[in-house]
Image (tube, rainbow, N blue to C red):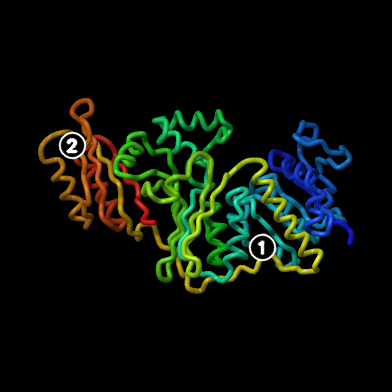
Amino acid sequence: MKGINVGLLGFGTVGSGVVKILKEKQTLLQDKIGTKIVLKKICDKNIELKRIVKIDKDMLTTDPYEVITDPQIDILIELIGGINPAKEYIMEALKNGKHIVTANKALLAQEGKEIFATAKKHQRCVYFEASVGAGIPIIKSIREGLIANRFLNIHGILNGTSNFILTRMSEDNFSFREALKEAKKQGYAEADPRLDIEGIDSAHKLIILAYLCYGKLFDINDIYVEGISRISSADIIYAKDMGFNIKLLAIAKKIKNELEMRIHPTLIPYNHLLSSVRGIFNAIYISADLVDDLLFYGPGAGQMSAASAVVADLVDLTRHIKAGIFSPVMEIIEDRMVGRLKNIEDIESRYYIRFLAIDKPGVLAKIAGILGKYQISIASVTQKERKKQKIVPIVMITHEAKEKNLKEALFRVGQLNVIKDKPVAIRIEEL
């Protein structure tokens, strides 16, 4: 059988890694799959830039349609990122009979329904292992290794930039700004880090994981997303004193026929595995009916780890093409036991709350009285060291309370003349 021809859109960091692997591991891959993977054409807007791998200049082009419309190319790898023109290129490639491999989580999360429908219409496949967790084989594990399971919960640390920042704040007493500056210096944060620190990147990845587990592709606007930019060094320290680490956690939790999907800073007990995930590493903790609890852990970013996942998808597709097996997209079956998404105001959780209050008699009683009116029970309370002008932090841990009640209570407390800053509340997750 002739080799499988591949075209690449995007010859940046990950794209260069893919080319490097295909060149250096060519013999190994051919021995394992019995077919040669032939990289036929590469497109990038800057083909003069020096890369980590040398390539024949005749393979390079700045015109994506030289790759998309080439009838000899079987698989298109899309690594340019973003929504447009990536969507346009993928749709045209599917219509031209090409299978797709992509790492583009934002595109799949926002435009996946149309892309997958087009793939099904044209009997093509869309593979996307590198879209979540870089080299962590989470998508293949869910799709194949756990195929007989019903999924109960997903808890994930899905963004390496945010986890790096929180790790620096926890271990080196950095402020948020200092930790973000360090992340940029190390190359872990973009010049505009909003997608990472505000939880949007994690939301895109959670949408993909939920699609695989529950068969529904949810709209990001229906998911509660809160980032880490309001987390202070004080919150990190107080949480540690009480036996918790703060992580940006992506949560999909099935409760009866409802599904909670939310991304926010979360207090996780020190003794839980997710609490020990440091730096740029990612971890996905899955609970399912047959296997109970599983942890997937590894670098959530990086040139070669992401490139490794792209090549894994190439190998899977090559095997399917060789065997004449065409399964459009993937056979994602909707879990009919999952109904609507639960509104964030209806969830129930324990909370860490911090108030800044004037140090005078009766303040704590006023706060507790308002919380009690909204059915919020206090599990513990600590009054920290006095600050300037007799201002003291008061830190509380609550029993389970409804989110809506907590928000209303904190608004009322915040109106007291003895409260000198907006109260801070962080959810505690029972894992």
Residue type at the position of mark 2: Val
| Outermost residue toward the bottom in this view | 336
Horizontal placement of 26 versus 357: left or right?
right
Indicate the position of residue 150 as horizontal and vertical percent values: 51, 69
For marks 1 and 2, give the CA distance. Answer: 55 Å
Q: In which quarter of the image is the C terminus?
A: bottom left
- Location of residue 120 (image quadrant): bottom right
Residue 385 shows up from this direction: yes
Q: Quadrant of the N terminus?
A: bottom right
Horizontal placement of 165 versus 22: left or right?
left
Q: Residue 373 carries which label?
A: none
Is residue 33 or residue 15 the one in the foreground? 33
Q: Which residue is drawn at 14% across and 40% down?
A: 363
Q: Which residue is drawn at 85% across and 48% down?
A: 40
Q: Is mark 1 on a helix, strand or loop?
A: helix
Task: Please determine whether, in this image, residue 199 is positioned above or below residue 144.
Answer: above
Residue at numbered disc 1: 116
Is residue 339 or residue 36 the one in the foreground? 36
Indicate the position of residue 389 as horizontal and vertical percent values: 20, 26
Q: Which residue is drawn at 78% across and 56% down?
A: 75
Residue 85 shows up from this direction: no
Q: Which residue is drawn at 21% across and 33% down?
A: 392
Marked residue nearer the N-terminal end (1 or 2): 1
Task: Please determine whether, in this image, residue 6 is positioned above or below residue 153.
Answer: above
Residue at numbered disc 2: 418
Q: Is mark 2 on a helix, strand or loop?
A: loop
